[in-house]
Amino acid sequence: DTTPNSDQSDRPTKEVKLGAYSKAKFGDGDVYEYLYSRIEDEFSNRDCTMFYKSFGLKTYDITAGKVIAQEFGVSEGCVSQRIKRITTWIRKDTELCEMLSNLMA
């Protein structure tokens, strides 16, 4: 059988779904700003900055944990724990998890 599976072919791509979600939620707003605002509402500015630097998000370059630790005057373990808290929180929300995975793809 060479007919395409209608369930698969009619399914929107992730980019289309994310764009539609963004339009529905914010009009012309940026879905990633929504992601960032959710993270920033939940965690301290310091923790967010460590997270963004670690993954090269927002305007930050990807930065090694050792360098982040030196910048903030904490241990690498402390940086790792703070980043893990945020990633664990994001994983509990499928919407945010999908946004972040699209952003990092």
Image (cartoon, helix red, strand yellow):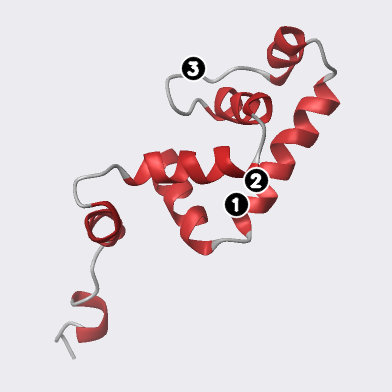
Task: Identify the residue at horizontal 29%, vertical 60% (top origin).
Answer: 21
Q: Nearer the viewer, residue 59 or 10?
A: 59
Q: Given the image, on which type of amino acid does mark 3 rest?
A: Asp
Location of mark 1 (residue) = 90
Per the rendering, the mark at residue 87 is 2
Residue 76 horizontal/vertical position (percent): 81, 21
- In the image, residue 59 above or below residue 104: above
Q: Given the image, on which type of amino acid does mark 1 rest?
A: Ile
Could you tell me which quadrant the C terminus lies in? Answer: top left
**Distance of label 2 from label 3 (alpha carbons):** 18 Å
Could you tell me which quadrant the N terminus lies in? Answer: bottom left
- In the image, residue 99 above or below residue 48: below
Q: Secondary structure at mark 2?
A: helix
**Distance of label 1 from label 3 (alpha carbons):** 21 Å
Task: Identify the residue at horizontal 55%, vertical 28% (top origin).
Answer: 52
Location of mark 3 (residue) = 61
Q: Secondary structure at mark 1?
A: helix
